[in-house]
Image: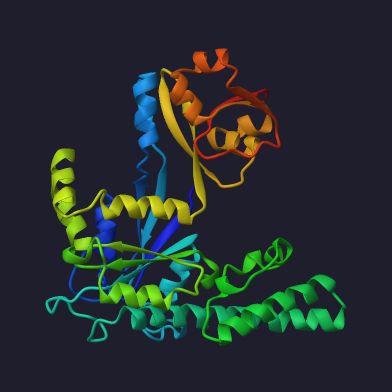
Amino acid sequence: MALQCGIVGLPNVGKSTLFNCLSNAKAQAANFPFCTIEPNVGVITVPDDRLVTLENLVHPQRVVPTTVEIVDIAGLVKGASKGEGLGNKFLANIRETDAILHVLRCFDNENVTHVDGSVDPVRDKEIIDTELQLKDLETVESRLTKLKKQAQTGGDKVAKATCEVLEKYRAKLLEGRSAREVELTKEEKELVKDLYLLTTKPVMYVCNVDEASAVTGNKYTEAVKEAIKDENAEMLIVAAATEADINELETFEERQEFLEAAGLKESGVVRLIKSAYKLLDLQTYFTAGVQEVRAWTFIRGSKAPQCAGIIHSDFEKGFIRAEVIKYDDFVALGSEAACREAGKISIEGKEYVCQDGDLMHFRFNV
């Protein structure tokens, strides 16, 4: 499942440092703009304590975690929507992602140059927001021009309904707001799903702070929190430079000691990966046997045949039923056999909506 989160931000805010901490794919981190020109893609393992618990109960030959893809995209500058800097390439790269991790510089350091000469994360946020909004406005107005003719000359009801949705987007974008703030019905969303607007993508603002601010934040993170309070968006505080130091430590014990000394329960990278997974609206089901315990990614709301198809297309085509054990029941009883004996295995059909943590066994016939 190739859903991707794109890391975006102005040059020199810590995007590549953060990406390096997340992935084995090393993006160049340097103190000058545009050091990342081609988008770097990293396949990141999603931490999940449930896998450890299942491993201890099942004792499989191997354990396979689930993953999420993170893309490090080149820094953007003012005028990107008009092609300034690497604007067109930047915007095209964002369009291909499914969610946005917007990194904001929330630390003072005279040794790290800011592209605009001073630290102001709210201003930086607005620069990128404006460029994305302008590009979306261009897309919406272009589609409106075409559809209005169809609606007027041919009396096309679908074209007319689509125009009404586009007018809602246009009004919001002209206010300097993002398209994700427009509330649409399921039917309305279907009408414009092929627009791929940049500002409809779910976004998380990642505040990159110094080590001293990693736990409580600072004046900059408070300003960001206030600025996004009316948006449908989330915020996460991470100290990228500190994460880079943690990344250099060789053992798990050393990393845990570092975190405890810094007053952190878990690393910012772990929190970011989990948040990215959630941002993409992803959940996990498990398969568990002596050969393998494995985590599988599915989109929230998926039904049993769709989830079966993630393992193999034949599973979906020939789906008969799913045998489902709830994670808590499996842990409490300790094995599939015990769950079966206790009547804790449910038999589900094609309409079953899979839940996060389900242990699944699919029956199929091709």
x, y percentage for residue 73?
A: 36, 66
In this picture, residue 149 sits left or right of residue 206: right
Up the image or down, 271 lies above or below 318; here it is below
Question: The C terminus is located in which quarter?
Answer: top right
Inspect this view and state whether residue 85 appears. no
Up the image or down, 338 lies above or below 117; here it is above
* Residue located at (41% from left, 19% from top): 291
**Residue 94, quarter of the rendered image:** bottom left
Inspect this view and state whether residue 168 appears. yes
Up the image or down, 363 lies above or below 98; here it is above
x, y percentage for residue 7?
A: 37, 64
In this picture the colour scheme is rainbow
All told, the count of numbered labels is 0
Which of these two is toward me, 327 or 41? 327
* Residue located at (46% from left, 52% from top): 278
x, y percentage for residue 257?
A: 14, 45
**Residue 229, quarter of the rendered image:** bottom left
* Residue located at (63% from left, 84% from top): 171
In this picture, residue 287 sits left or right of residue 154: left
* Residue located at (25% from left, 51% from top): 267
Which of these two is toward me, 73 or 207? 207
